[in-house]
Image (spheres, rainbow, N blue to C red):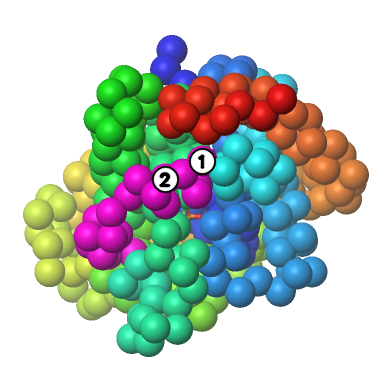
């Protein structure tokens, strides 16, 4: 079994996009020390985080992952800043990656917006730290949503350059695992924009903490069009909002968009939306309830994260120490 690594930023409540595109796919990949799931708080501070909020959201994210089925006894669940190897290898990779590579990253361009000069240097080198997260464990399988594809290509470029420059095949190639119809869940307000936990409009997303009434309201208000549904997904080419809702329903019910359309062809959204609301509430209500229970005992979450960090460091420290030896750093005694 290849070692699995994935991460999520504690920069807000996890969304339906995070769940369908990533977290849900992590659950069957748990294999003890060969599966690592990380709350990437060092990545979160590439944009300012209020200190008290960062603490709260980090715990909340850990609770969300456990509520979704990540079991700290069957995988390693931990917090990035608790394992020093990430920052250390991240710096090394800052010195391996080329500016030209980083300049091509579309996510930096999106997140930095118009005023690029005002973006943090951390936001710019963000993908180098992400490469370090994975390579610090010699992990080779990385389950993510579609928006991370370019970052993972960069992680392979970094590994290849390290191996080439130092003449040792030290860091393995990684393989992105980008799965299924929900690899890119779009905003409920704009079908051309990704659903995101940092979108200023709460109406644009479903949060894993939303109750049944909130979910129903958001889906009822979700942007759609007045056309009836076609028989095949190809017929939704120019209707991004409609395609998104059909894709979400397919993902929630474990089927394909074409199968959803076979059942609903000719109907409008006034008929599809109630079906979607029921499927969403059935899937998410137990997760929200489990999160609330877990957050009643923050000490237990902190203990689980501490144990996860201890196990993670036991794997990463020797891998990073060996990388430093390959590079010729004088060994610390
Ligand atoms: P983050 O926190 O933005 O998102 C966590 C995971 O959720 C996926 N995702 C989505 N999938 C489908 N539709 C959406 N609308 C959607 N929004 C988010 C993301 O693709 C991701 O898999 N850079 C990463 C975190 C990270 C990481 C890593 C991932 C840091 N180090 C190492 C893998 C390996 C991020 O910002 O994810």
Q: In which quarter of the image is residue 333?
A: top right
Residue 154's spot in the image, x, y percent? 29, 46
Q: Which residue is drawn at 53% across and 66% down?
A: 46
In the picture, measured across the screen, residue 314 lies left or right of residue 149, that is: right
Say which residue label 1 marks.
89
Judge whether 22 appears above or below 141 on screen.
below
Residue 244 tag number = none
Viewer-proximal residue among 198 and 139: 139
Q: Give the range drawn in magenta.
A: 89-107
Circles 1 and 2: CB atoms closer than 8 Å: yes
Q: For the residue labelled by badge 1, is the local secondary structure a helix, a strand or a loop?
A: helix
Q: For the residue labelled by badge 2, is the local secondary structure a helix, a strand or a loop?
A: helix
Viewport quadrant of the N terminus:
top left
Q: Quadrant of residue 45?
A: bottom right
For label 2, the crowd category at 10 Å Cα-Cα, with few meaning under 14, some 14 to 19 and many 20 or more, is many
Residue 97's spot in the image, x, y percent? 32, 49
Residue 93 tag number = 2
For label 1, the crowd category at 10 Å Cα-Cα, with few meaning under 14, some 14 to 19 and many 20 or more, is many
């Amino acid at each position: 079994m290849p070692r699995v690594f994935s991460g999520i930023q504690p920069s807000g409540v996890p969304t339906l996009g995070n769940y369908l595109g990533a977290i849900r796919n992590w659950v069957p990949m748990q294999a003890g020390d060969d599966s690592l799931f990380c709350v990437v708080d060092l990545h979160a501070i590439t944009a300012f985080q209020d200190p008290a909020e960062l603490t709260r959201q980090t715990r909340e994210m850990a609770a969300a992952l456990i509520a979704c089925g990540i079991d700290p006894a069957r995988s390693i669940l931990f917090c990035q800043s608790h394992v020093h190897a990430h920052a250390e290898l991240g710096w090394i990779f800052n010195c391996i990656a080329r500016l030209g590579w980083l300049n091509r990253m579309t996510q930096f361009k999106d997140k930095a917006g118009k005023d690029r000069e005002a973006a943090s240097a951390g936001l710019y080198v963000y993908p180098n730290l992400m490469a370090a997260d994975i390579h610090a464990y010699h992990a080779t399988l990385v389950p993510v949503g579609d928006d991370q594809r370019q970052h993972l290509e960069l992680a392979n470029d970094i590994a290849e350059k390290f191996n080439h420059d130092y003449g040792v095949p030290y860091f393995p190639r990684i393989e992105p695992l980008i799965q299924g119809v929900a690899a890119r869940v779009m905003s409920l307000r704009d079908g051309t924009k990704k659903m995101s936990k940092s979108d200023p409009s709460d109406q644009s997303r479903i949060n894993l903490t939303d109750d049944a009434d909130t979910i129903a309201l958001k889906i009822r208000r979700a942007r759609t069009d007045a056309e009836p549904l076609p028989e095949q997904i190809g017929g939704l080419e120019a209707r991004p909002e409609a395609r998104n809702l059909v894709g979400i329903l397919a993902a929630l019910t474990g089927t394909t968009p074409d199968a959803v359309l076979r059942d609903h062809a000719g109907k409008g959204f006034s008929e599809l939306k109630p079906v979607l609301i029921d499927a969403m509430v059935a899937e998410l209500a137990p997760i929200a309830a489990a999160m609330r229970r877990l957050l009643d005992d923050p000490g237990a979450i902190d203990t689980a994260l501490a144990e996860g960090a201890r196990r993670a460091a036991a794997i990463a420290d020797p891998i990073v120490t060996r990388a430093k030896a390959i590079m010729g750093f004088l060994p610390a005694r």
